[in-house]
Amino acid sequence: MSAVDRKKLEETTRYDPSEVEGRVFAEWMEGGYFHPEAEGSPEENFSVAIPPPNVTGVLHMGHALNGSMQDALVRMNRMRGRNTLWVLGTDHAGIATQSVVEKGLRAEGKSRQDLGREEFVRRVWEWKEEYGSRIVEQYKRLGASCDYERERFTLDAGYVKAVHRVFKRLYDKGYIYRDLYIVNWDPGSQSAISDLEVENREVEDTLYSIDYPVEGSDRVLTVATVRPETMLADTAVAVNPGDERYGDLVGQFCLLPLVGRRLPIIADEHVDPEFGTGALKITPGHDPNDFEIGRKHGLEEIVVIGPDGRLTEAVGDFAGMSAAEAQKAVVAALREEGRLRDEQPYAHSVPFSHRSGERIEPLISLQWFCRMDELAKPAIEAVERDEVRIAPAQWKRVYLDWMREIRPWCISRQLWWGHRIPVWYCDTCEETYVAEQAPERCGACGGELCQEEDVLDTWFSSALWPFATLGWPEDTPELRAFYPTSFLTTAREILFLWVARMVMTGIEFAGDVPFRDVYVHSVIQARDGRRMSKSLGTGIDPLEEIDVHGADALRFGLLAMSSTQDVRFSDAKVEQGRDLTNKLWNASRLILLNAAAVEPAPRPLHVEDRWILSRLEGTIASVTEKLETYDFAHAVQEAYSFFWRDLCDWYLEIVKPRLYDGEAEVSATLLWTLERLLGLLHPVMPFVSEEIWSFHPARRGHLVVHPFPQADESFIDHSAEADVEGGIGLTQRLRAWRDLVDVPAGSILSARIEGVDPPGFVGRLARFEISSDGGDPVASIGPVRVLASDQLDAEAVAERLGKRREELRAEVERGERKLGNAGFVAKAPAEVVEEERGKLERYRAELAELG
RNA sequence: GGGCGCGUAGCUCAGUGGGAGAGCGCUCGCUUCACACGCGAGAGGUCGCUGGUUCGAAACCAGCCGUGCCCACCA
């Protein structure tokens, strides 16, 4: 070790991540370790496509958790020598990005319409160039070992090509079509959105009952609605076909109040006779159910609410009002006409836009759709046959249930930012062109062509992520080397939105599933159990955690928190990680500063050496297995406990005298153990492990590409483990005894051993001078006979002895009761009964010894 | 309405058939030459409730209570 390094180690008694992390990351980047050549086959390589964060995004706790998991597995596989690629990139995020830029424009007093489409899109690109790499930089802070040289964007040139190819092929197959259909209209973003972008919220509304007079009779049909303003677009009233109250009315007509339109009275199974009066007003233009019923019965589709959420010219007096204003006006008018029979408070769930938060306005409009049933079939089979494995297991069923019920996907959005749909219409004739490249002129009439105004749903392009990022549709070396990717970790909220669609497009276009394994991780909630969200102000900023405690601490904490069930964010776990980095640093200082100049090697001289080597290999095997099965929480807990308890609390304390003596064997063993431990921890705590490694005498290159330790079972030594664990247990009993009889902490007591010799460290660690002196012992703890001394208070010792007797009597009684149970002895497994007998014997022996 | 979870120490969570665990917090004692982000020793739990299965249940089954999430077109 250089003098400079030694000085640094000697002086730095506290690990400071802020001093280390930036420097170490720069070394990794400089080494090019994250940038693999496109060689080898997907089977032998290891690759992961990051769930692309929104280009407008800032790193949140979900990214941090997901990133920590992916990086752990990516780093482990890279260390194993596999050609490893972690693809990084961002999503253009249509609505989110457009909104950000529009907000900026509004501050200048402008709208996107003022700029025009071309200029507006140019402005968004400008914004992207300036701010779009923010989240990428934040992934670096986390330590994510992505290939930053292959960064992709869902709107970059190659990606556009992939999107156009997919659109064209789906269109040619007849899956993509244009239709006048009822959609979820989001007045906030002024666009249609898909079913998956709608969230239902519980809302307090008023349920109005309105009388519709039956034509040519004095009967009325009373219908109930929470949206009276939509009555203006009613085109029928429906009753259940089995409803005897109305059987005679089916085929007759009602008169729509306020408007006077004749509404056919129809029969439809959908109507629940139990609800209200059993009569349902039908508004195909503004209600998805009514729309279906309307199409079934060939009803007229009237639209009275426009895309701006205001009543249209079609409704005279109410035109121009917002839906809410129209509701008041319609109710007032109905009341005046005496048609309003009842109003009741009514709680029900109502669709809201997940994007803008505004209440969805269902309305009929001309949109592009994609039929999903044919695409879903192979994607269902792939999961059924475990060609894509979904874990934990319950999500497999959730995926399959949803896929089997899949409905057409509305893929067009009335936005400017996104993949503009590659469809051209002829100005002069009726011709429509779908193409990957813009056609020059109309082939039929030679007329000018204009492109479809709408853009594609952002998820349409995200669905191609695993192969489009590797260069598809070109046959690239990257695609050949890294597709399919190895696994995907994701939050369950995008299982349908993203994961399922990637499986479908992967099979259809890239000829194979996009990944072999999907791990659905838990959600980290806010400290109070609410959702972490920006709007609620409940978010916890991972970057702040990194600033304060370091990236390793956050990574450790998040992995330790993670679980199959949702958990609350735990500051304590991050602090535990922080303490761990510091402890690692200090234990390493102890080892490195005192090591004799030797090569790391297992050189067991004593039972404790065999014990620590056995524990080390056992830990490596177990932690590795847990990482491979996505059991991150137990993996990190186990590594933690091996290091803290076994290595620091016991082994280092046991061997300190040998280490200070300059014993070569113990130095070799410690350097060996440290090397393997750093390798094991590196996937979870890359910075601190790399930094410590830089001081290790065996270092030849960076830890990031150092071989990952592979468990060597030949070191497993059950007898050494049993002996040392026995010694540890005895040491703890002796210490506890000392504490209970109130001897000063630093004092050395005298004792002699009777019976089986415990491991040699017991006396020193428990502060007992072991001799062969005779004399009457004042107390017996296992084989240790404590000898009388001035420092011992006879009364306290006697009291302690009495307590121990009580404990033992209770134990003996418990054992006797259990073994006296004929059923237990007869039916329990033999080894369980044997164990019980052994324990009872030991307790009886100790009790007899105490008298 | 359907589906999936969860209820274990003061807090956050492990534990899925053989004597209740971790981290934090708390109490007591330690300026022990790696670390006070430390060391040693403790206290603290009718494992939501009721019934059942079993020699044995925190764990398996049923019901109930509480709580969270996802899906769903009852106005």
Image (tube, coloured by chain):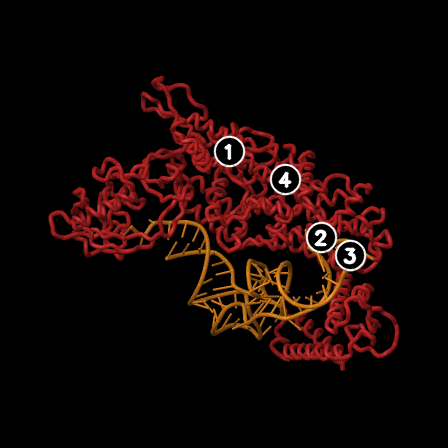
Chain colours: A red, B orange
Query: SS for tag 3?
Result: helix
Q: Chain of mark 1?
A: A
Q: Is residue A496 visible?
A: yes
In this rendering, is residue A835 above or below A458?
below
Q: Nearer the viewer, residue A495 or A94?
A: A94
Q: In the displayed structure, does residue A631 sit left or right of residue A267?
A: right
Nearer to us of marks 1 and 3 is 3
Residue A322 drawn at (x, y percent): 29, 41
Badge 2: few (under 14), some or many (20 or more) residues near its Cα, within 10 Å?
some
Query: SS for tag 2?
Result: helix
Contact flag, marks 1 and 2 (Cβ < 8 Å): no
Which amino acid type is shown beneath numbered disc 3?
A: Leu
Q: CA distance from mark 3 to mark 2?
A: 12 Å
Lower sequence index among marks 3 and 4 = 4
Lower sequence index among marks 3 and 2 = 2
Query: SS for tag 1?
Result: loop
Q: Nearer the viewer, residue A38 or A770?
A: A770
Q: Could you tell me how many numbered marks the image carries?
A: 4
Instruction: Indicate the quadrant containing the C terminus of chain A: top left, top right, bottom left or bottom right.
Output: bottom right
Q: Nearer the viewer, residue A510 or A33?
A: A33
Q: Is residue A170 visible?
A: no
Residue indicated by mark 1: A154
Residue indicated by mark 2: A583
Q: Chain of mark 2?
A: A
Q: CA distance from mark 1 to mark 2?
A: 43 Å
Residue indicated by mark 3: A652
